[in-house]
Image (cartoon, rainbow, N blue to C red):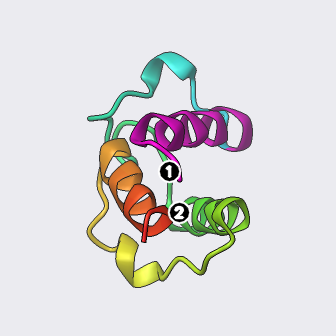
Amino acid sequence: MQSRQDVYQQLHDYLVDLFEVPSEDISPDARLVEDLDLDSIDAVDLIVKFQELIGKKVPATEFRSVRTVDDVVEKIHALVNT
């Protein structure tokens, strides 16, 4: 069981370590594409990292509506706690 804060922290770490996003740019309302400069390949890589972390398949379709950091946290938190 992971809290929303745990998921947020893990996402923050992935964004900094894997995608070289400046830490100060990451906030719950930061937009993945417009603010953090992620593209669709980055999104797939992020999904794969979370699959490894939680040990569950993360359907890509779940992420079509994701736009912000908080959207990702919400989706992952929901998957982890089902």
**Residue 27 among those drawn in magenta:** no
Of the residues shown, which amino acid type is indicated by label 1?
Answer: Leu
Front in this rendered view, residue 9 or 82: 82
| Comes first in the chain, label 2 or label 1 | 1
Q: In which quarter of the image is residue 35?
A: top left
Numbered label attached to residue 38: 1
Q: Residue at x 53, y 62 (%)?
A: 43
In the rendered image of this protein, does residue 50 appear above or below residue 82? above
**Residue 6 among those drawn in magenta:** yes
Q: What is the CA distance from the residue labelled 2 to the residue labelled 1?
A: 7 Å
Main secondary structure found in the magenta portion: helix
The residue beneath circle 2 is: 43
Front in this rendered view, residue 52 or 48: 52
Look at the numbered discs 2 and 1 and tell me whether their residues touch, using CB distance below 8 Å. yes
Of the residues shown, which amino acid type is indicated by label 2?
Answer: Ala
Q: Where is residue 78 in the image (x, y as percent from the top left)?
A: 37, 63
Numbered label attached to residue 7: none
Q: Residue at x 38, y 83 (%)?
A: 61
Question: What is the span of residues highlighted in magenta in the rendered image?
Answer: 1-18
